[in-house]
């Protein structure tokens, strides 16, 4: 679990958001592995026949596991875009609107929402 923890750097909200986005993208890739890669191994190599036969039964469980980090990645991309827009277009009010505490809170809220939506 230490590989998935984010380095807490209270001085930069942008670096925290980009680290969170990198973790979400990594989770999307890991969740896509059993959904898109493993079913194609058996027809080409003959390996993982039992997984190939169970694949359609596992699909109702694999699809939501894939959609949770995928939705989180979309939300985090929007959050990074809003943060950068505020920093560039409104540099004097950025500290009030996009402060570190608000960015951390919105990151965790988006993670919870993506878990509920996914």
Image (spheres, grey):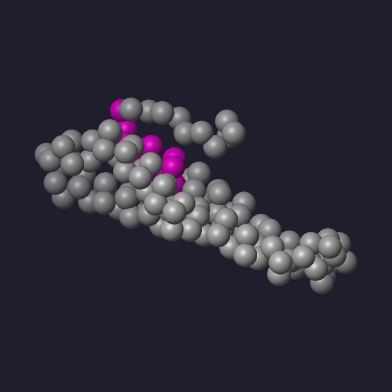
52 over 93 or under it: above or below: below
- Residue placed most toward the observer, 90 or 35: 35
Furthest toward the right, the residue is: 46
Furthest toward the left, the residue is: 92
Q: Where is residue 107 in the image (x, y as percent from the top left)?
A: 36, 43
Quarter of the rendering containing residue 29? bottom right
Furthest toward the bottom, the residue is: 43
- Residue placed most toward the observer, 82 or 55: 55
Q: Where is residue 111 in the image (x, y as percent from the top left)?
A: 42, 47
Quadrant housing the N terminus:
top right
Judge from the rendering whether residue 98 lies leftward or rightward of residue 34; answer left or right.
Answer: left
Q: Position of residue 74 (x, y in %)?
A: 41, 57
44 over 27 or under it: above or below: below
Judge from the rendering whether residue 59 lies leftward or rightward of residue 82; answer left or right.
Answer: right
111 over 101 or under it: above or below: below
Secondary structure character of the magenta stretch overall: helix
Q: Residue at x 30, y 53 (%)?
A: 81
Judge from the rendering whether residue 47 lies leftward or rightward of residue 70; answer left or right.
Answer: right
Q: Which residue is drawn at 38% across and 37% down?
A: 16
Judge from the rendering whether residue 28 lies leftward or rightward of residue 37; answer left or right.
Answer: left
Is 19 included in the stretch rendered in magenta?
A: yes
Number of numbered discs: 0
Q: Which residue is drawn at 18% across and 36% down?
A: 95
Q: Where is residue 8 in the image (x, y as percent from the top left)?
A: 41, 28
Q: Residue at x 50, y 53 (%)?
A: 69
Residue 41 visible in the snapshot: no
Q: What stretch is highlighted in magenta?
A: 11-21
Residue 65 visible in the snapshot: yes
Is 105 included in the stretch rendered in magenta?
A: no
């Amino acid at each position: 679990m230490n590989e998935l923890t984010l380095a807490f750097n209270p001085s930069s909200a942008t670096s925290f958001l980009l680290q969170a986005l990198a973790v979400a993208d990594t989770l999307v890739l890991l969740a896509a592995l059993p959904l898109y890669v493993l079913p194609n191994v058996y027809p080409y190599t003959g390996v993982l026949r039992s997984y190939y036969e169970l694949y359609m039964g596992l699909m109702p469980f694999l699809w939501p596991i894939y959609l949770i980090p995928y939705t989180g990645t979309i939300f985090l991309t929007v959050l990074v875009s809003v943060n950068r827009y505020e920093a560039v277009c409104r540099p004097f009010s950025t500290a009030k609107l996009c402060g570190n505490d608000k960015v951390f809170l919105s990151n965790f809220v988006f993670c919870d929402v993506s878990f509920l939506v996914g």
